[in-house]
Image: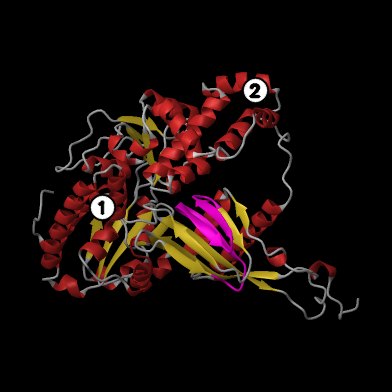
C-alpha cells in the first residue's frame, strides 16, 4: 500500500461546513426593521410572526415556519408587519473549500453556486433544529459540540434535498395529502384536477370524497381558508386591503370585499377584534389572559381542564374543555359546534402537539402569539390590542407595577438583597436552573434579586426569553447561590422519589446554602404557571416567604 495516497474512503471533493454564527432577531413596533449582510451564505428561519424580506428588487413575504437561504454578500432588509412582532433565527454558514492536495479538484458548494435566494414556504423541522442549535450554541461539553455539528449538517442536508426536483403530485396519492396541500397552498392557484391527481381519483369522485371527509366542497373549504387568513391579516394590521387580497389569493380588494360580505355580512374595513365574542384558546395560559381582560373563552383546547383561579378574576362559568389530544376532525367539529370566531395559539404549542395553524384556519382565523419569545406582559398587551381592550390591560399592569415596587422595597430591607439566589428545578429526567420566566420572573425581574453569575449573563442577553439551563448534578456548585429555591416536578405517577438523586448527592450536601439552611422548597402548582394572574400570586407568596409581610390576599 502506498502510504502517500489518501485512502479512498477519506477522499472528499466537497467543502467542509461549520456554524459561523447563529442569532435570534426580534423585531417589534419599536424596532420594526433591520439591515443584514454576511460574507457567507445565511439561513433565515421565521420562528414566529409575519413580515417581509427585501433584497435588491425582490420582496419575499415571511410567515411562521418559512425559511430563506441567502447567498453570500447580499444586503437584505427584514421588516416586521405592523402590530405583529417578527422573530427569526439567522444561521451563517462557514464554508471551508480546501485546496491543498489531495483536494485540488474541490467542487464549489451548492450553497453559493447560483447566487439566488431560495425560499421554503414551510420548513418546521429545520426551524426546530435551528431553535435547538441556538439554545445550545454555547456548548459546555464535546458531546454537545458534536450534537451541534450534527444539527448543522441535518439542516444543510434538508436544504439541499429541498432544492432537488420534487416528485410529481401523483406519487403516493391520498386524500390527506391533497388536503394538506390545499391548506398550505391556499393563496396559490389550485385546481380540482391537481387535488384529484394528488388523491389518485377522478375530479368528480374527488369532490364526493372531499365532502365526506370535511363536510364542505373543495371550493367552500378554500374560500374559508382564504377569508380566515384575510381576517388574520386584518387583525394584525398587515397591509392595505389590496395587499391582503393578493396575499390570500384573490385578484383584488373588490373581489375580497364581495366574498367577505357574503360570509360575514359586513365589509372587511369594519372587521376588528372588538366585535369578536366567541374565542378558543390553545392551552390554559392564554385563557388566563383573556379572563383578566373580562373575556371568557368559549373553548379551551388543552391536555387538562385545570385552571388557575384567583380572588381578583371570576372563575369561568361556561367555558368548554376540548382535549387537544383528540383527532383533528374532532377538534374542528368542536370548534364549529361552538361557533368559534377566533383561535389564539402559539406556534410552539402547535408544533409540540403536532398541529398546524392551517388545519384550524378553515374554522376561524388563528392569531399566533409567540410563547417563548415574549414575556407575560407582552402576551397580555398583544391579546388586549387584538380585542380592543388595551386600556384594561394597561390599568392592570399599572396596578401590578405599584405592587412590584412595594414588594421590592420590603424584600430589599433585609439581608436577602445582598445574596445571590438560585432556582433549581428537579424533573424526573432533568435538572434545570431557571432564568427569567415562571418563578424566575418574580425573583429576578419583579424583586430585583441577584441571580448566579452564569444566569445573570443569559438574563442580560435574553431577558424574559431565557427560560432555563439544563445541568448535571456535578454542575450544582457552579450555579448555586447564597440562597436556593427548589421545585420538584412529580413523575407521571405523582412520585417525587427521583429528587433523591439530587438531594442525596455529595454535591448538593456540600452547597453553602444547604449547610446554612437557606433552601426553600416550593410547590410546583403555586410557582410555575406563567400568566398575569399567577405572576401576581407568586409575587405575594415571595414577599410572604422572604419577609413574613402580606401585600395581598394569598
Image location of residue 71, percent across then percent down: 63, 66
55 within the magenta span: yes
Q: Which residues are magenta?
A: 37-66
Compared with 490, 86 (above or below) is below
> Residue drawn at (61%, 18%), measured in percent from left and top?
208
Residue assigned mark 1: 527
Q: Within 10 angstroms of label 1, few (less than 14), some, or many (20 or more) residues?
A: many
Secondary structure beneath dot 2 equals helix
Q: Within 10 angstroms of label 2, few (less than 14), some, or many (20 or more) residues?
A: many
Q: Nearer the viewer, residue 513 or 332?
A: 332
Q: Quadrant of the N terminus?
A: bottom right
Q: Earlier in the sequence, mark 2 or mark 1?
A: 2
Residue assigned mark 2: 206
56 within the magenta span: yes
Image location of residue 442, percent across then percent down: 24, 60
> Residue drawn at (52%, 59%), measured in percent from left and top?
53
Q: Is residue 300 left or right of residue 220?
A: left
* Residue 296 showing in the rendered view: yes
Image location of residue 529, percent across then percent down: 29, 49
Q: Nearer the viewer, residue 443 or 211?
A: 211
Q: Nearer the viewer, residue 10 or 48?
A: 48
Amino acid at each position: 500500500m502506498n502510504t502517500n495516497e489518501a485512502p479512498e474512503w477519506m477522499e472528499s471533493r466537497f467543502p467542509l461546513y461549520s456554524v459561523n454564527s447563529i442569532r435570534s432577531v426580534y423585531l417589534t413596533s419599536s424596532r420594526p426593521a433591520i439591515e443584514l449582510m454576511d460574507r457567507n451564505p445565511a439561513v433565515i428561519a421565521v420562528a414566529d410572526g409575519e413580515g417581509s424580506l427585501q433584497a435588491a428588487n425582490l420582496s419575499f413575504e415571511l410567515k411562521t415556519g418559512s425559511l430563506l437561504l441567502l447567498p453570500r454578500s447580499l444586503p437584505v432588509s427584514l421588516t416586521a408587519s405592523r402590530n405583529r412582532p417578527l422573530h427569526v433565527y439567522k444561521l451563517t454558514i462557514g464554508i471551508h473549500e480546501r485546496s491543498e492536495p489531495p483536494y485540488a479538484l474541490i467542487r464549489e458548494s451548492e450553497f453559493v453556486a447560483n447566487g439566488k435566494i431560495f425560499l421554503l414556504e414551510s420548513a418546521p423541522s429545520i426551524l426546530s433544529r435551528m431553535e435547538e442549535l441556538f439554545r445550545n450554541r454555547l456548548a459546555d461539553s464535546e458531546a454537545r459540540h458534536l450534537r451541534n455539528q450534527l444539527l448543522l449538517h441535518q439542516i444543510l442536508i434538508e436544504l439541499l434535498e429541498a432544492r432537488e426536483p420534487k416528485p410529481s403530485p401523483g406519487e403516493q396519492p391520498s386524500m390527506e395529502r391533497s388536503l394538506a396541500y390545499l391548506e398550505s397552498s391556499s393563496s396559490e392557484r389550485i385546481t380540482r384536477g391537481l387535488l384529484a391527481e394528488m388523491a389518485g381519483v377522478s375530479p368528480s369522485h374527488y369532490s364526493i370524497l372531499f365532502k365526506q371527509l370535511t363536510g364542505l366542497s373543495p371550493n367552500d373549504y378554500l374560500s374559508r381558508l382564504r377569508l380566515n387568513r384575510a381576517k388574520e391579516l386584518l387583525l394584525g394590521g398587515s397591509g392595505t386591503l389590496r395587499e391582503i387580497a393578493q396575499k390570500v389569493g384573490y385578484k383584488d380588494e373588490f373581489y375580497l370585499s364581495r366574498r367577505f360580505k357574503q360570509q360575514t355580512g359586513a365589509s372587511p374595513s369594519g372587521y376588528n377584534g372588538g366585535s369578536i365574542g366567541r374565542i378558543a384558546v390553545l392551552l390554559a395560559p392564554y385563557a388566563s389572559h383573556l379572563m383578566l381582560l373580562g373575556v371568557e373563552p368559549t373553548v379551551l383546547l388543552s391536555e387538562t381542564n385545570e385552571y388557575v383561579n384567583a380572588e381578583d378574576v371570576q372563575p369561568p362559568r361556561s367555558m368548554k374543555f376540548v382535549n387537544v389530544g383528540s383527532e383533528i376532525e374532532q377538534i374542528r367539529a368542536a370548534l364549529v359546534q361552538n361557533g368559534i370566531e377566533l383561535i389564539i395559539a402559539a406556534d410552539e404549542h402547535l408544533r409540540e402537539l403536532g398541529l398546524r395553524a392551517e388545519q384550524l384556519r378553515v374554522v376561524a382565523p388563528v392569531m399566533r402569539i409567540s410563547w417563548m419569545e415574549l414575556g407575560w406582559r407582552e402576551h397580555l398587551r398583544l391579546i388586549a390590542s387584538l380585542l380592543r381592550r388595551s386600556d384594561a390591560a394597561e390599568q392592570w399592569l399599572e396596578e401590578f407595577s405599584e405592587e412590584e415596587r412595594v414588594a421590592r422595597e420590603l424584600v430589599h430591607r433585609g439581608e436577602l438583597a445582598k445574596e445571590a439566589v438560585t432556582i433549581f428545578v428537579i424533573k424526573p429526567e432533568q435538572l434545570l436552573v431557571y432564568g427569567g420566566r415562571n418563578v424566575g420572573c418574580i425573583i429576578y425581574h419583579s424583586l430585583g434579586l441577584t441571580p448566579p453569575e452564569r444566569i445573570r449573563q443569559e438574563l442580560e442577553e435574553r431577558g424574559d426569553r431565557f427560560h432555563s439551563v439544563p445541568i448535571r448534578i456535578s454542575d450544582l456548585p457552579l450555579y448555586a447561590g447564597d440562597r436556593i429555591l427548589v421545585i420538584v416536578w412529580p413523575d407521571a405517577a405523582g412520585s417525587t422519589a427521583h429528587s433523591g438523586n439530587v438531594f442525596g448527592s455529595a454535591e448538593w450536601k456540600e452547597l453553602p446554602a444547604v449547610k446554612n439552611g437557606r433552601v426553600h422548597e416550593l410547590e410546583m402548582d403555586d410557582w410555575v404557571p406563567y400568566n398575569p394572574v399567577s405572576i401576581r400570586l407568586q409575587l405575594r407568596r415571595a414577599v410572604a416567604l422572604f419577609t413574613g409581610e402580606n401585600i395581598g390576599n394569598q
